[in-house]
């Protein structure tokens, strides 16, 4: 799998990347699924072309925000769109959000596996941030390290 485009998040007043893909209810009345014709038009537009590449298997980029300890969906680009200007409180989401911070220490060309100096880990329960932890990077084993190269 190719390294993936990050979701976007505003956290503590700063625009940051999100190395997670929080799900959203596709049947929400304010979430619009683009038609194939709309997708084809976006796929040839240089501004949205990356969304329809192997760097974005989900074919959308979500923008999120943490405000007063709550997670909000603020924008969707690509295959899905958020109708209206108001953010939606993400009370449907329970899980962990990873916000990479600092320099890239180890680029890994797969998913969100690239290692950064730190990660902010947010534990969310029904849209409410229950725990925040800042963790330093840890060495991850690369797939290539697991391959037996014999007697070199």
Image (tube, rainbow, N blue to C red):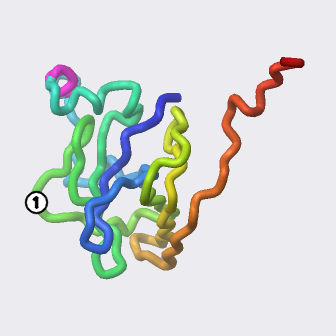
Residue 147 place in picture, x, y as percent = 77, 26
Q: Residue at x 20, y 64 (%)?
A: 87
Residue 131 as seen in the image, left or right of residue 31: right
Q: Residues within 10 Å of mark 1 (few under 14, many from 20)?
A: few
Quadrant of the rendering where the C terminus is positioned: top right
- In the picture, residue 55 is in which quadrant? top left
Q: Residue at x 23, y 27 (%)?
A: 49
Indicate yes or no whether the magenta region holds residue 45: no
Seen from the viewer's position, the closer of residues 86 and 35 is 86
Q: Position of residue 78 (x, y in %)?
A: 24, 37
Local secondary structure at mark 1: loop
Residue 140 seen: yes
Q: Which residues are magenta?
A: 39-44
Asked which quadrant contains residue 91, the reply is: bottom left
Residue identifier under label 1: 85
Q: Position of residue 100 (x, y in %)?
A: 45, 57
Q: Is residue 105 left or right of residue 54?
A: right
Query: Depth check: 52 or 16 in front?
Result: 16
Depicted 2 relative to depicted 32: above or below: above
Residue sitting at 55 percent across and 43 percent down?
Answer: 106
Q: Residue furthest left?
A: 85
Residue placed furthest toward the bottom: 68
Considering only vertical position in the picture, is 116 above or below 134? above
């Amino acid at each position: 799998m190719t390294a993936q485009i990050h979701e976007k998040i505003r956290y503590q007043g700063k625009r940051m990347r999100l190395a997670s893909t929080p799900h959203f209810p596709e049947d929400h009345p304010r979430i619009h699924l683009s038609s194939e014709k709309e997708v084809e038009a976006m796929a040839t537009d240089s501004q949205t072309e990356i969304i329809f590449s192997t760097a974005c298997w989900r074919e959308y980029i979500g923008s999120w925000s943490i405000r007063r300890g709550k997670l909000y969906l603020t924008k969707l680009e690509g295959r899905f769109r958020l109708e209206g200007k108001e953010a939606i409180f993400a009370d449907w989401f329970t899980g962990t959000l990873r916000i990479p911070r600092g320099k890239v220490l180890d680029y890994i060309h797969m998913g969100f596996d690239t290692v950064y100096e730190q990660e902010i880990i947010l534990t969310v329960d029904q849209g409410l941030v229950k725990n925040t932890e800042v963790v330093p990077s840890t060495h991850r084993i690369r797939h290539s390290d697991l391959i037996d190269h014999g007697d070199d």
